[in-house]
Amino acid sequence: MTLVTSCIRQPLVHFLIMGAFLFVFYLAITDDEASEDGHRIVVDEPTLLRFLQYRSKSFDPNMAAQKLSALNMSKREQLLMQLVREEALYREAGRLGLHRDDYVIKQRMVQKVEYLARGFGEAEQLIDRNAVATYYVENISRYEEPSIATFAHVFVRGLDDNARQRIKGLQQALSREDIAFSSAMGRGDRFVYHANYVERSRDMIDSHFGERFGAKLFEMSPDQKRWQGPVASDHGYHLVMLFKRDPASVPSLDSIYPRVAEDARRVALDQQTEQALTDIVSNYEVTFEGLPWAETLAWQTSDSDAG
């Protein structure tokens, strides 16, 4: 029983089962005989230029030819890979009797094959705890919770000498009169955003005050009885009463296990789906006509060439 279960979980077995399903379904809906060249993809320059025009949504053959000429070999290779992949998946969809000579329908048919491959894998994709733990360690930065701060501030607009004198005067008055933050909100100028920030992230604080303010704030030690500063921002000077500051942290795997497990399952499914689609494309022999620069590309070599 263990051997059978192990075999069922193998991606290759999944693909073979999916292939058998597609073949049976194809026989059920069409009596057409496959063409001798059904697994031979011919790519010539007009085909490539049409593909490029559809991809760029700009239907100008001359412009497409110029764009193709301007592409370096790496970009040309990517373009050819996209075209061949699309054509192979399109023909696979055509085997199901869905094909029509229309680019929009062609795209939809390709999507149907992709969805079928993904849906089959989705039903079978299982991730054990060890795999989830490995994924968590390898992608731990994705789960980092940002540093946060809770503080109040008094603001003086501007960064000139007058503004600096005003903020120093306010600091002396607030300290001398021992004014709590709740009573200090009427002092100074009106800030464009908020007077109080509760458990706000460094990114948000930077977006409101600027990076230099954020850097200074997260160097401070919390003190609920003292107005610290003055601290310069993109808007002016601030006196800050910092109540709490928590550094960035990563939650334990147990505390976020469902989230990590779903992420790991999705990535594994993406990889399995991509492999299934790549296997479909590899079944086709690709011939380039009138594209001498494409003949030197190593990616076009398939198992059929070796045979």
Image (cartoon, helix red, strand yellow):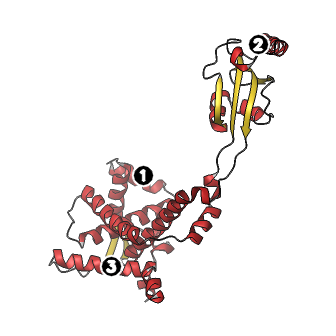
> Which quadrant is the N terminus positioned in?
bottom left
The disc placed on residue 66 is 1
Q: In the image shown, does 52 or 295 lie closer to the viewer?
A: 52
Taking depth in this image into account, of 111 and 134 the one nearest to the observer is 134
Disc 2 on helix, strand or loop? helix
Q: Amino acid at mark 3?
A: Gly
Q: Given the image, on which type of amino acid does mark 2 rest?
A: Ala
What residue sits 41% from the left and 84% below the top?
304
The amino acid beneath tag 1 is Gln
Residue 33 position (above or below residue 130): below
**Residue at x 29% of width, y 72% of height:** 92
Q: Residues within 10 Å of mark 2 (few under 14, many from 20)?
A: some
Residue 151, percent from left and from top: 70, 28
Q: Mark 3 touching mark 2, by CB under 8 A?
A: no
Number of the label disc, if any, that sits on residue 163: 2
Query: Mark 3 vs mark 2: which is more N-terminal?
Result: 3
Q: Could you classify mark 1 by the number of other residues whose Cα lies within 10 Å: few (under 14), some (14-19), or many (20 or more)?
A: few
In the picture, residue 283 is in which quadrant? bottom left
Question: Is residue 110 in view?
Answer: yes
